[in-house]
Amino acid sequence: MATKMALIIEYDGTCYYGFQLQVGLPTIQGEIEKALWQLTKENIRVMGAGRTDAGVHAKGQVISFWTESSLEVERFIHGLNFYLPLDIAVKAVYKVNSNFNVRHDARNREYKYYILNSWTRSPIRAGYSYRVGGYLDIGAMNRACEFLVGEHDFISFASSKEAGMMNTIRRVYSAEVKKDNELVIFNIVASAFLPHQVRNTVGSLVRVGLGKMKVEEFCSIISKRKRALAGPTAPAQGLCLMQVNYSQSFGEEM
């Protein structure tokens, strides 16, 4: 009898063309499905809670799938981690109800974007942050963040290629910028995100922080609903999907 499973996974997205399958290109979904085949000998299709872009990382991505495997708990977790490349890891496994939908049942998603505010490069942080030289006004950036909170049409911050193909209204629950020495961290929690929404938002916030855009101009980007007003798009390597939250717990952890 088939069982529906949910996995919490962490990955470094540097070497991948995003989460979603792409023919002939390495993706997170492709590597997970390959590992599931090697472990269970089943052709399993997985679904992710978020479709992270090429180069974007995740600490708490959630995926689900059906399996007829009766493998024991430890072998399921350790077996997948054995077959997965070192830049992808399964952190936890759950049995979930058959009607659980990993994408639509999510209450919200939390992303962090890391900015290295330094004139000099950092080889250690290069793959996980966006370096910006010059003084960043954190207070101004947070005043701009206030306009993000609530339900808005965020088409101005969406990918121009896909913005016209979907509902672009999203609810943002919180948005804040904090500084920790040289690291400036933008944290945002929303019901869902449009393609490139966080990275385009960061691009505009950096302009506010550098004094190249006024807070009022940032606010007008939302109200004018024109994609060309936002950005530039911040690099992928600074973005990380931290966690996906659900109204209820998944169920029995394996």
Image (spheres, rainbow, N blue to C red):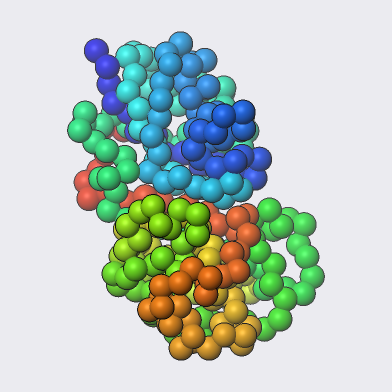
197 or 238, nearer to the observer: 197
Q: Residue at x 46, y 61 (%)?
A: 158
Q: Position of residue 99 (x, y in %)?
A: 20, 33
Q: On the rendered image, what quadrant is the C terminus found in? A: top left
The location of residue 19, given as percent across then percent down, is 51, 40
Res 105 quadrant in image:
top left
Residue 166 lies, with reference to residue 174, above or below; the image says above
Which quadrant of the figure contains the N terminus?
top left
Pinpoint residue 217: horizontal percent, then vertical percent.
Answer: 49, 85
Where does residue 107 sit, x and y in percent of width and height? Answer: 27, 53
For the question of whether residue 62 can be seen, the reply is yes
State the image quarter where residue 109 is shown. Answer: bottom left
Q: Is residue 152 left or right of residue 196?
A: left
The residue at 39%/67% (across/down) is: 154
Of 182 and 195, which appears nearest the observer? 195
Q: Relative to residue 153, is residue 47 depicted above or below?
A: above
**Residue drawn at point x = 43 percent, y = 16 percent:** 43
